Amino acid sequence: MAELERSGVPVRVITQNVDGLHQRAGMPSRKVLELHGTARSVVCTKCHARGPMEDALARVEAGEDDPPCLECGGILKSATVMFGERLDPVVLGEAVAITKACQVFIAVGTSLQVQPAAGLAGVAADHGARLIIVNAEPTPYDDRADEVVRQPIGTALPALLGRLSAESKEN
Ligand SMILES: [Zn+2]
């Protein structure tokens, strides 16, 4: 994905991962929407101040059992969305806007069963995007897809992105 982005194709990543691997692979952070937040940051449950996870872990290593928020003394947790918690409406809103505007929407490695993230595939199709689903198992959106790829992601995705990149250069 990062390579495709560097080649000049406008790419946005909407991810449910919290590990920051897209950014480490070279995707610019501003182009990665983390629907489930990030484990690379901590957030205060009381005043919502944020900070690097690294700093909080360094404080644990230095002997603090449960390092409190430096702003208000509240409890820090990883800045991830827990099961049953609502997604950040700002991030979700941005994801919907990008989905409505995109030409190609590729859903990779997701069963597309958990709303509201799964619904983005439907939003993409509703707004005229070419919908491509890459997943080992069938998904509820397969019948709306222009293309369904069942091969392993590690080999299927590079091939698919190479093909899309070549197509974008022809146009
Ligand atoms: Zn706080």
Image (cartoon, rainbow, N blue to C red):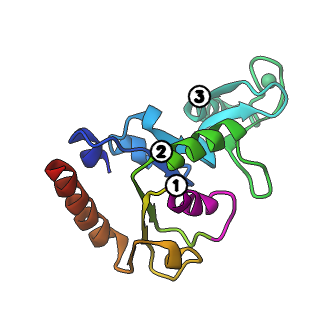
What's the distance in space between the residues labelled 3 and 1, CA to CA? 43 Å
Label 2: state its secondary structure. Answer: helix
The tag on residue 127 is: 1
* Of labels 3 and 1, the one closer to you: 1
Q: Is residue 131 above or below residue 12?
A: below
Tell me, yes or no, whether the two marked residues, 2 and 1, touch with CB atoms within 8 Å. Answer: yes
Residue 141 lies, in percent from the top left, at 55, 73
Q: Nearer the viewer, residue 81 or 31?
A: 31
- Residue 124 belongs to magenta span: yes
Query: Pointer 3: what residue?
Result: 55
Q: Which stretch appears magenta?
A: 113-127
Label 1: state its secondary structure. Answer: loop
Residue at image coords 45%, 80%: 136
Q: Is residue 121 above or below residue 49?
A: below
Query: Pointer 2: what residue?
Result: 101
The tag on residue 149 is: none
User: What amino acid does circle 2 point to?
Assistant: Ala
